Image (cartoon, grey):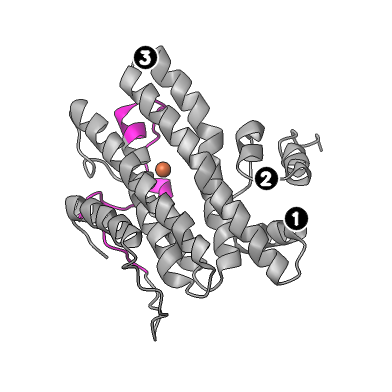
Amino acid sequence: MEADLDLKVSKVAQLQIDWADDLFEFTPTDVIHRVPDPGRPEKPLLVSPKELPRRRLGSPEGLHSIAHIEFNAVNLALDAIYRFQEMPKRYYLDWLGVVVEESYHFQMIREHLYHLGYEYGDMVAHDGLWMTTYETDHDPLVRMALVPRTLEARGLDVTPPMIQKLRSIGDKRGVEILKILLQDEIGHVEVGSRWFRHICAERNLNPFNTFQETIENYYHGDLRGPFNYEARAQAGFCEQEIAWLKTLNQPKPAQ
Ligand SMILES: [Fe+2]
C-alpha cells in the first residue's frame, strides 16, 4: 500500500533482508483484504485503454508505459505473496525474488526516462494489469494463469521488436535495459508456470485444458500473436501449449 516511490523501493529491499534474516512472518492473517487500489503515487493519471494515445515503439511514451508496467509488477508480485497464504514456502521465496527484480527494473527505466527529460507520472497510463490482478484474487490457479502466464508473457513477445527499435534510434542504454528485462521476465513467467502446474497437480487437473478454460473464462482480451515461442518455451510453456499458440497465430480463413 506504500504510495511513495522511493519508500516503496526501499521497503522492498528491506523485505529481502528480513527474509534472509528469518524475520519473515508466515502465520496466516485472520482477514485477507481485497485491494482494488494498491499504493501508487497520484500521477500517472489512469485513463481507460481507449483514451490512451498511440505510443510509438521506442518513444518516451513507450518507455513510460514500461515504467508503469514495472511499477505495477512490484505490486502484483507483493499481492501474490500476501493473498495466497496456504502455499509452500518456496512459493513465497519465488515471488519475493520477482518483487525485488521488478523493483530494480522500475528503477532502471525510471532513471533512463529521467535522462531523457521525463519522470514517471508525466504521461497517462491505464490500469489493466492491476484490474486483472484484482479480478483474479479469489484463486491462485486463476491468478497464475492470467497474470504471469498471459499478461506478463505478452512482454516476452513485444520486447524483442522494442529492442530492435531502440537499437535503430541509437538508444544504447535503452537496449541494455530491455535486454535485462526480457531475460528476467522469462524467469517471472516461469515462476507462474511452475506454480500453475503445481496447483493443477494438487487438484488433479489437466494443466493444458485448465489453462485454456481459464483464459476463456477470465481473459477479456484476445490471445494474439506474434508470439515469442522460444522465450515462452523457456518460461515453461509446454510443447502442446506452443503448438496451440501456433494455431492462434494463423491468419483467419477467408469467409
Ligand atoms: Fe519486470
At 42% across and 51% down in the image, what residue appears? Answer: 97
Give the position of the C terminus as an image quadrant: top right
Label ID, residue 208? 1
User: Is mark 2 in CB contact (under 8 Å) with mark 1?
Assistant: no
User: Is mark 3 in CB contact (under 8 Å) with mark 1?
Assistant: no
Q: Amino acid at mark 2?
A: Phe
Q: Amino acid at mark 1?
A: Phe
Residue 66 position, x and y percent, is 37, 39
3D distance between C-alphas at marks 3 and 2 = 33 Å
3D distance between C-alphas at marks 3 and 1 = 41 Å
Residue 247 position, x and y percent, is 77, 39
Q: Amino acid at mark 3?
A: Ile
Residue at the outermost front position: 21
Crowding near the residue tagged with mark 3, few <14, some 14–19, many ≥20 C-alpha atoms within 10 Å:
few
**Residue 17 part of the magenta-drawn span:** no
Where disc 2 sits, the SS reads loop
**Earlier-in-chain disc, 2 versus 1:** 1
Which portion, as a residue range, is magenta? 36-63
Q: Main structural element of the magenta stretch: helix, strand or loop? A: loop
Label ID, residue 169? 3
Give the position of the N terminus as an image quadrant: bottom left
The answer to whether residue 112 is left or right of residue 168 is left
The answer to whether residue 104 is left or right of residue 133 is left
- The answer to whether the residue bearing label 3 lies less than 8 angstroms from the nearest atom of ligand 1 is no
